[in-house]
Image (tube, helix red, strand yellow):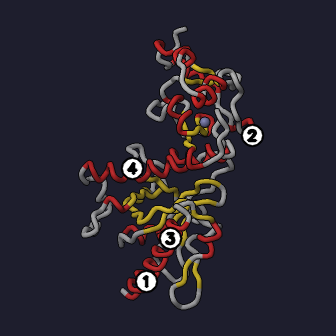
Amino acid sequence: MAWKDDDTRLRSAAFAQVQRLQQVYDNRIPWQEISAGFDLGDGRRRPLATQAQGIYKPKGHPAALSIKTVQPRQGRTNPYSDTLAPDGCSLLYAYQARGGPDHSSNRSLRFAMEHQLPLIYFFGLEPGIYAAVLPMYVVGDDRTRQQFELVPGMVLASHETPTHTHHLLDSPPDRRYGAQLVLARLHQQSFRHSVLSAYQHHCAMCSIHFDEFLDAAHIVPDSDPLGVPDVRNGLALCGLHHRAFDRFLIDIDDDYRIELSPELLRRRDGPVFEQAFLERHRQPLWLPRDTRLRPAAKYLQARRRSRPPELWRS
Ligand SMILES: [Zn+2]
C-alpha cells in the first residue's frame, strides 16, 4: 500500500498543525490559518481545508483529510441540530451533492471510512472562525439518505484500533456518552459565540464588557424541549446576573426591561447588591442592535410560566 506511508505523513503533519492552532487560538481558529495550512517538510504548504468544498482531499491522495461545516450567518447558531444524530452521539454529514454519490469528494470520505483514517472536523462557530475536532472517524455511509455518519474518535482508547465501521454503535454506554459530550461541548461553544457577539460582548443587565465574566445564558433552559440553541433564546450575562437569572430571582418583561422578583426586592445588602440589582429594577436591557437577534417573546413567555410562584408572590 504505497499510499499508506504518504498518508500517515500527511495526516501527522496536518494534525500537529491543527493541535498547535487549537492551543494558540483556544480552538477558535481563524479561517486564514486553516487556509494557510501546513508544511510537509518539502517547503510546499497545503491547506487544511478549502473554501470551495466541505470535504477536502489533498491532491494526489486517495483519502479525505478534513471536512467542514457551512459558515453560520452573523449572530446565528450553526444549524447544528440538523446534523446531530438523534441519539446525540454522532454527526450526519451530507454528501457533496454535485456529481452524485460517486463524486471524488464522497469517494475520498468513503475511502477514509474503509481504512478507518482519522479526519479533522472544522465546525463554523461564526463567520471566519472554526473550532476543530480531531480525530473524527467516518463510521457509516447511507446511500439512500446521501449522508455519512461521523463520530469523534477520542472515545477510543489509545491502544485500540477501530476494526469495523460501527464500533461506536455497539460499544459500551460510557463511550457513547463520551462522544455525546464532545459534540455537546461544540454545540455550547457555538451558542456562546453567537450570543456574545450579538450582545457585542456586554452583560445584558449591567453591560460589563469582559469576556472572562460573561456567559451565554439560556432564557428557556436547554433541558426543556423549547430550550433550543437559538440566539433569540440566549442572553449574554455576567456570572452574577446569570446566577440570579437561572434561579428565577430576576426576569425580563415583554418590553425588555429588567424585573426583580418580589423576593429579591425585599432583600437588603451592601452597595454591590444595591447597584447590581435594586438599581436595575425596571431598567432597559442592553440589547443586540440587530432586532432579529433580540430575545423572542415565545421564550420569555415560556420562561415566565415556569417561574417558582413562591419567589414571585408580592
Ligand atoms: Zn451583569
Which amino acid does the dot numbered 2 rest on?
Answer: Asp
- Residue wearing tag 3: 18
Which amino acid does the dot numbered 4 rest on?
Answer: Leu
Which amino acid does the dot numbered 1 rest on?
Answer: Arg
Tell me how far mark 3 sits from mark 2, CA to CA: 34 Å
Question: Which mark identifies residue 235?
Answer: none
Element carrying mark 4:
helix
First in residue order: circle 1 vs circle 3: 1
Q: Position of residue 291 (x, y in %)?
A: 74, 35
Question: Which mark identifies residue 181?
Answer: 4
Question: Which mark identifies residue 290?
Answer: 2
* Whether label 2 touches label 4, CB < 8 Å: no
Q: Residue at x 52, y 14 (%)?
A: 312
Between circles 1 and 2, the one closer to the viewer is: 2
First in residue order: circle 1 vs circle 4: 1
- Quadrant in which ligand 1 is drawn: top right
Q: Is residue 111 left or right of residue 263?
A: left
Element carrying mark 2:
loop
Which amino acid does the dot numbered 3 rest on?
Answer: Val
Element carrying mark 3:
helix
- Residue wearing tag 1: 9
First in residue order: circle 2 vs circle 4: 4
Tell me how far mark 2 sits from mark 4, CA to CA: 32 Å
For label 1, count other residues whose C-alpha is less than 10 Å away and answer few (under 14), some (14-19) or many (20+). few
> Which image quarter is the N terminus in?
bottom left
